[in-house]
Amino acid sequence: MRDIKKPDQTLQTDQNETPDPQARSATPMVLILCSLAALILSQVIRVGIARELRLTPLLILPVALILFFIGIRSMDKGSLPRWMDKVLNACSSWLGIRPEQFISLMYSVVFSILTCTAAGFLYQMRSPVAAILCWLLSIMLVLLGGWKKPEVALKVSKKTWISAAVIFVISLTIRAINTPTIPIVLSGDEASSGLFSLKFLSGEVNNLFITGWFSFPSLHNFLQSLSVRIFGQTTEALRLLAAFGGALTVLLVYLVGKEMFGNIAGWTAAIFLTGLHFHNHFSRIGLNNIWDGFFFIFVLGCAWLGWKHHSRIAWLLAGVGIGLAQYFYATGRALFVIIPVWVLLVGLFNWKRFKQSVPDLLTSLWVAVIVMLPLAWFYLNYPNEFFAPMNRVSIFGDWLNFNAQAFGGSKVLVILNQLKLGILGYFEVPTRAWYEPGVPILRAIPGVIFLIGLAFTFVHPKDERGQLLWVWLIANALAVGLSESTPAAQRYVAATPALALMIGFSLFQFVQLLKNWLPKWSRIFSIVVIAASILVAVDDLRFYYLQYTQNSDFSGFNGMVAQKLANKFKNEPAGTPLFFCGYPGMGYDSIASLPFLASQINYINLTDNWMQSDLSIPDTNEAFFVFLPNHDADRTYTEKKFPGGVWSEEKYREGETLYWLYEWQGK
């Protein structure tokens, strides 16, 4: 027996004392490959960019060359320089990764910086292929560098995936049906975003790392351009992308709710969000707001999974979500605050776990920085573009000074009142601006269920799940309260998944109480709660599709004029002449839905009295003349100057005239 054991013991000793040659060479090999890629790409980028932007690749070039030399020398000698080996081992050990992974983390920033240089700050990227390649390479390196094997494998059952797919299909179907007429008007902002998206198709714009329309990042416009390429220059093309984002949000609410609170909570939260009138509305608007909900549930759901299971993969995905969220609506910036605040809060009650999670949190934030760095670099050079979305709506400045008069000159009271309205917008005060249904986000019954859920969170104040929902909802209410038009509906989209989760949690806790009271009826109680959530969702759907949409034009008088004209002229031949008489309040192109939906029309805006204009008779076989109300003199003069035409009238609600149309068939 001794003779048999000795070889095994000797073998184990040799393995401990002699590292695996493959593992020993991994670090210098990664150093060589990353340095080589940086050398090649920096040289490629230098050729295609302006002289003033060549400094960055010039600085990277010698650094990469030195590191490449260190790598090949280390391969030859069998070890890294002692100082480098010591630094790599210390940093990688603290992060729980291998030394070659730490090199990947560090090199990810090099390729992210090269992305900035290759892209530049103009509509046209300086070196498009290199920019996209460097960005994807930086993301790949940071994920490979931060990854480590999870302590607990996260498994999702086949039944869960099937349930998630069913939820996604149902929610997408509800949101995608009849998008051209619900909402009834393609708003000017939607169409303006669409017009900028067309620039990607025409080749005028290809830069994903700058801002575009209304100082919003251009990545969303690029995605819209793909939809337009598939579905044409239509309302559906702009809105179907939003419907897809809304449906993805519902799917994630189910998965996250199930993981956080259990199966009943996941189902009830998803069912509620599927029918929520507020979420359906923003899932049908061709803007970037709806993606806030997706990124918030994705990021905070991953953060919860990372905390609960000590999963580095979940934290890395959270970092990707934070970074990508910066390329959409401005509220996504709050994620940089919400996650650290929540981690600090839960750390107060679990200090040991907090210290264990610090490397995960920092790695997640590093991933976020790498993903968003190209856009951040643009913001550093054009800070006004970064602050523009906030400056447009901030209450500080003239707005605060003016409104302080109503509170006895106290600015503090104004701010406190704004914060109160930001909170009450969830369940008490009707939303404003982009959605004015006359009710708050949560109508009567959902509002009560939500408040009960808040009460349940107070029972266990140290529960990380309740703390996450609290930080999430309070942060969003602060963002809303510190902006004008409170409670402005478009700034609440990020909070809708949290509201759904709170309602799911509330119903789940209520079921638990009933089960503890009458355990034999537990299955019946579960069925009743699911049925109740379906009824609540159906009632919200009834409210939105049968009540709100039947009594709202969504965009006012001029918006309805633009929509009706667009519907009429979108199929007219290219070059059809149209004279638009709506001065001084409206022109053909003053609301972008007309130029977007009927871009082929050759229009001329009358800017003054028709009789005083120098417009001659059109040299064409046909022309259209559009007159808004209160232009009777122009109408009379037109009929005299261009006789033989046919008049028609388009009506508004309650018989009010939208416009008069005169069709003239030429001489």
Image (tube, rainbow, N blue to C red):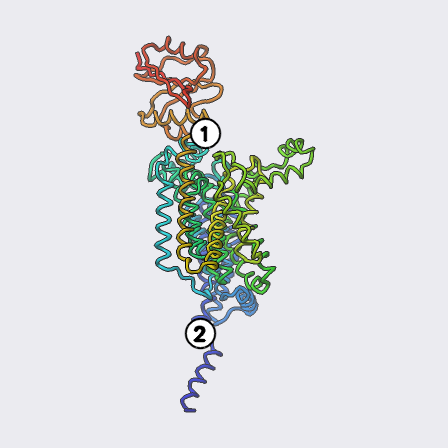
Gap between marks 1 and 2 measured at Cα: 69 Å
Mark 1 neighbour density, 10 Å: few (under 14) some (14–19) many (20 or more):
some
Q: Amino acid at mark 2?
A: Asp
Question: Viewer-nearest of labels 1 and 2?
Answer: 1
Q: Amino acid at mark 1?
A: Ser
- Say which quadrant the N terminus sits in: bottom left
Residue 396 visible from this viewpoint: yes
Residue 138 visible from this viewpoint: no
Q: Nearer the viewer, residue 430 or 11?
A: 430
Q: Percent position (x, y) of residue 394? A: 59, 37
Mark 1 or 2, nearer chain start: 2
**Which residue, given by chain and number where applicable, does mark 2 sit on?**
20
- Label 2 sits on a secondary structure element that is loop
User: At 45% across and 22% down in the image, what residue appears?
Assistant: 587
- Label 1 sits on a secondary structure element that is loop
Q: Which mark is residue 26?
A: none
Q: Which mark is residue 555?
A: 1
Q: Percent position (x, y) of residue 219? A: 44, 43
- Count of numbered marks: 2
User: Which residue is farthest top?
Assistant: 640
Q: Percent position (x, y) of residue 408? A: 69, 33
Q: Is 629 situated above or below 375?
A: above
User: At 52% across and 36% down in the image, what residue appears?
Assistant: 430
Quarter-of-image position of residue 383: top right
Q: Percent position (x, y) of residue 161? A: 36, 55
Q: Nearer the viewer, residue 379 or 429?
A: 429
Mark 2 neighbour density, 10 Å: few (under 14) some (14–19) many (20 or more):
few
Q: Nearer the viewer, residue 221 or 135?
A: 221
Q: Nearer the viewer, residue 286 or 103?
A: 286
